[in-house]
Image: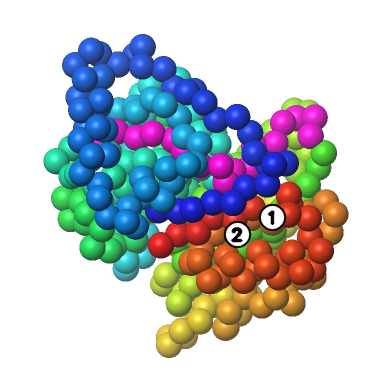
Amino acid sequence: MAAVLVPGLLRGSVGAICSQAALSKATRCALRHLTLTSIMKSKRKTDHLERTANVLRQEVVTAAKVCGTVNESPSVKRLRLLVADQDFSFKAGQWIDFFIPGVSVVGGFSICSSPRLLEQERVIELAVKYTNHPPAVWIHNQCTHDSEVAVRVGGEFFFDPQPADASRNLVLIAGGVGINPLLSILRHAADLHRERTNRGSGYEIGTIRLFYSAKNTSELLFKKNILDLVNEFPEKIACSLHVTKQTTPISAELKPYITEGRITEKEIREHISRETLFYICGPPPMTDFFSKQLENSHVPKEHICFEKWW
């Protein structure tokens, strides 16, 4: 559900990382049929597969099983998927093609969990907003525990530093469900910092600042997860949560982090430096505005990475 612009600095090789060796012949045939059928029947001009046709993605479609669901907000459901194939992997910020048996349209959803969760539990998480898009309807109305689906990783919007890379600050700018890939990046950065603290080696992350805007506090997804990271690493992580149409009182816990009104150009400009990378994900007008403003402020294009969702 996205189109991306990725700087050469951040772009890495994305190939057929997954292996089908662990899949049975019957499963492989079923996945191949599901993939081809879905591609042939996805005719809408705004379809995920068409929008991302030229974006790098893995070649292998992997079986997955729903192992949990929870309502993240009144309009967003969080989905936990068990991916047993040990060869399946992704980079923080990437999305998946989401194949559903019996649903001809292919979904496209960003992963909101960290690569570490997959390594430890073989689980990935998605947060899907309710719309009339068939995959979203299925997730909200028909999906059950143990429902079987298939997934394929894609996307050039990611943060995947290597241990010897130069330390970078991150500014993450999210609008609505555009928080999903940025939460994955935030969680991954926190995991890297924990690893370096515990082992004394590994990638050294700089500071991380999250700017996140939604209609109201009930639609600010993952509030507790975000604030837990801010409180765990106050010297590294900070957040500014914005609400544009708040009509109810804001809780005392959230109030110190909340600003009423949109994220402003001035707030972002204060964090520009040569060591800072900017990741932006949200509605097209928002991503266009901030990427343009950063360019006008002489931020190198290779330090600006954005993804649009519809």
Query: Does residue 207 appear in the picture of this structure?
Result: no
For this rendering, which residue is in front, 161 or 58?
58
How are the colours assigned in the image? rainbow
What is the quadrant of residue 34 in the picture?
Answer: top left
Quarter of the image containing the C terminus? bottom left
Q: Residue at x 49, y 23 (%)?
A: 17
Badges 1 and 2: C-beta atoms under 8 Å apart? yes
Dot in front, 1 or 2: 1
The secondary structure that most of the magenta stretch takes on is: loop
Q: Amino acid at mark 2?
A: Ile
Q: Residue at x 66, y 77 (%)?
A: 264
Q: Rounded to the nearest whole Å, what is the CA distance between mark 1 and mark 2?
A: 8 Å
What segment is highlighted magenta in the picture?
A: 149-165
Q: Earlier in the sequence, mark 1 or mark 2?
A: 2
Rendered image: mark on residue 280: 2
Rendered image: mark on residue 66: none
Magenta stretch contains residue 155:
yes
Q: Residue at x 46, y 84 (%)?
A: 245
Q: Residue at x 38, y 34 (%)?
A: 152
Q: Which residue is disc 1 drawn over? A: 304
Mark 2: secondary structure: strand
Magenta stretch contains residue 26:
no
Q: How many marks?
A: 2
Q: Residues within 10 Å of mark 2 (few under 14, many from 20)?
A: many
Q: Position of residue 42 (x, y in %)?
A: 25, 47
Q: Position of residue 183 (x, y in %)?
A: 54, 52
Mark 1: secondary structure: strand
For this rendering, which residue is in front, 199 or 156?
156
